[in-house]
Amino acid sequence: MKELKVRFGRLVGAHRRRLGWTQEELAAHANMSVDMVSRIEAGSTGVRFGTIDKLAEAMKIDPAELFSPSIPGTALERQRLTMITSRLAKLSDKDLEWVENVLEAVLRSR
């Protein structure tokens, strides 16, 4: 459990720094104490879903991004990627193969 807390805290810190915010600024945006933000980033405390939601909302990210090391550059990219991923998840393996081939052809021409 400690490892998960540390990994979560590192991702919170990475998203905060990507925004150019201090811990004080994140605390203000998320309506929580600076001490709490500091303990979360240090991995010394666990968080509840409500806190995860407050942090994600403050940083304008999907809460799932606090559990993934993939940190896209802008909220617009995140929304598009989430939409595309959701649509792709519904496809059959055969259709996914077709999409992969199309994607490779498009990217090859760039």
Image (cartoon, rainbow, N blue to C red):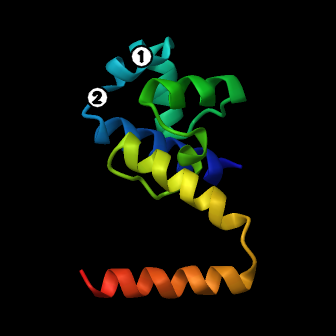
* Residue positioned 42% across, 86% down in the render: 104
Amino acid type at mark 2: Trp
* Residue positioned 49% across, 11% down in the render: 31
Q: Position of residue 14 (x, y in %)?
A: 38, 45
Q: Position of residue 38 (x, y in %)?
A: 44, 28
- Local crowd size for mark 2, using a 10 Å CA cut-off: few (<14), some (14–19), many (≥20): some
Q: Position of residue 96 (x, y in %)?
A: 64, 80
Q: Secondary structure at mark 2?
A: loop
Q: Secondary structure at mark 1?
A: helix
Look at the numbered discs 2 and 1 and tell me whether their residues touch, using CB distance below 8 Å.
yes
Task: State left or right for residue 48 relative to residue 17.
Answer: right
Amino acid type at mark 1: His
Which label is found at residue 39?
none
* Residue positioned 34% across, 18% down in the render: 24
Query: Real-space Cα distance between discs 2 and 1?
Result: 10 Å
Q: Decide: is 33 above or below 50.
A: above
Residue at image mark 2: 21
Residue at image mark 1: 29
* Residue positioned 56% across, 52% down in the render: 83
Dot 2 or dot 1, earlier in sequence: 2
